[in-house]
Structures are given as structure tokens and as C-alpha cells.
Amino acid sequence: DAGVIQSPRHEVTEMGQEVTLRCKPISGHDYLFWYRQTMMRGLELLIYFNNNVPIDDSGMPEDRFSAKMPNASFSTLKIQPSEPRDSAVYFCASSLGQGLVYTFGSGTRLTVV
Amino acid sequence: AQTVTQSQPEMSVQEAETVTLSCTYDTSENNYYLFWYKQPPSRQMILVIRQEAYKQQNATENRFSVNFQKAAKSFSLKISDSQLGDTAMYFCAFTPIQGAQKLVFGQGTRLTINP
């Protein structure tokens, strides 16, 4: 398996623009997670899905953030409009079952200028 | 709420030495999993070791081992015969077996192995 695939690897955008981050989980995994990593706040869970259904989105900072999982092999995290404070590394991870191995993607480094 | 605390922001040792990274956590759960993840400069999150709370035996993976003290809610990582490639950020993480399936991370320890 190719692992969890995220795109793009780097994204630079101007404040106010829409940003879409993409994730392809490992085939057969039933959980998908979106994390954000910053120096100040460390690794924070934004949202997670089980069998394509959002279970907990309490970590989504505000209404500018939205996430979807239209099928078992694809998820998006969208920020509209983007702000400089959204600059961070965004990780997608997937797992099979409860508490088993979580596999992370390589992350997307987002810079909003 | 579950919390994970890593009290050592940075550590530095010489190659071939043994180093121990500390982690404590707070939870009211009885059954859970604990993890150590490594994040090298490439930023990839790599699973180092995993421990089930219901197992008394400490997990080991080659040069990596843990000291799991459930009563004290302590989960330290020992790296033996450290290598230059061990230089990375190390994160301790927790997830309950029942309920919300999400990893809660500590703030990380930046480990540098010096030649």
C-alpha cells in the first residue's frame, strides 16, 4: 500500500483565498483524522470520520473550516477565506478499528500571506 | 478530558548513549493505548512503539523500549545505543479503547543525537 497520500505537499496562498487540502487514506481503513500542527499549539485534532461520517468536529477552529469525506478513499479540508493564522502543517491520518495503528500522511505545509 | 504532558522540551546526547524521554498523562479511562511517534525533519510522523494499558509487560521494538507505570500514569521511552538517525521530535500520544477514537498528543521533545 502507498500509505496515506496528501496533496499538495506545500501550499502558499494569499489571505482571503480558498484553500483545499486533499487526503487519500489507506484502503480498508475506516477512520480518517485531520490534524493541524503549529509551534504554539502542537498537534491538534480538527475532525475525524468513521465510515465516511463525521464523528467529532469540535476541533474545527471556526466556520471558515469545513471537511468532507464523500467516499472511503477521499477527504478534503477546506478553508474559506484563509487567514495568516491558518499557516500550519495539516496532517491526515487513517486507522483500522479502534486504537490500532494510526498511519499519517506526509502533511501539507500551508502558508497564508 | 485526557491530557498528555512531556516535560522535556529538548534533550541532547552523544551517539551510542542511552536516553529516556518522559511522558505523563491524565485520564479516567481504565483501558487505553499509548504511543510514541517520531517526527524527523522530513515531518513524516512515524510510529515508534505502542503499548496497550491492559498489558503489564512493557513494549519493546529493537533499540526502543518503554517503562509503563499505569498507577503513576507514566509512559517513558528509552532509546538504547542512540544513532544519528534518531534525531527528531518525539511525541507521546494517548487514545482510549472505548469512546472517542482520537489521538491526544503531548507537546513533544526535540531530541538531538550528537556525533
Image (cartoon, coloured by chain):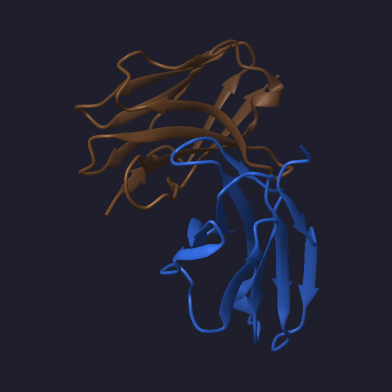
Q: Which quadrant holds the N terminus of chain B?
A: bottom left
Whether residue A27 is situated above or below residue A50 in the rendered picture: above
Residue at image location 61% in from the left, 16% down from the top:
B82
Whether residue A106 is situated above or below residue B20 in the rendered picture: below
- Residue A91, position as x, y percentages in the image: 63, 55
| The quadrant where residue A51 appears | bottom right
Residue at image location 35% in from the left, 43% down from the top:
B5
For this view, does A82 lie left or right of residue A45? right
What tint does the image give chain A?
A: blue
The chain drawn in brown is B
Front residue of this view, candidates A109 and B103: B103
For this view, does B16 lie left or right of residue A54? right
- Residue A66, position as x, y percentages in the image: 58, 77
For this view, does B77 lie left or right of residue A110? left
Tally the marks. Answer: 0
- Can residue A38 be seen here? no
Front residue of this view, candidates B109 and B37: B37
- Residue B6, position as x, y percentages in the image: 40, 40
Front residue of this view, candidates B109 and B65: B65
- Residue B19, position as x, y percentages in the image: 50, 19
Q: Which quadrant holds the C terminus of chain B?
A: top right
- Can residue A8 be seen here? yes
| The quadrant where residue B58 appears | top left
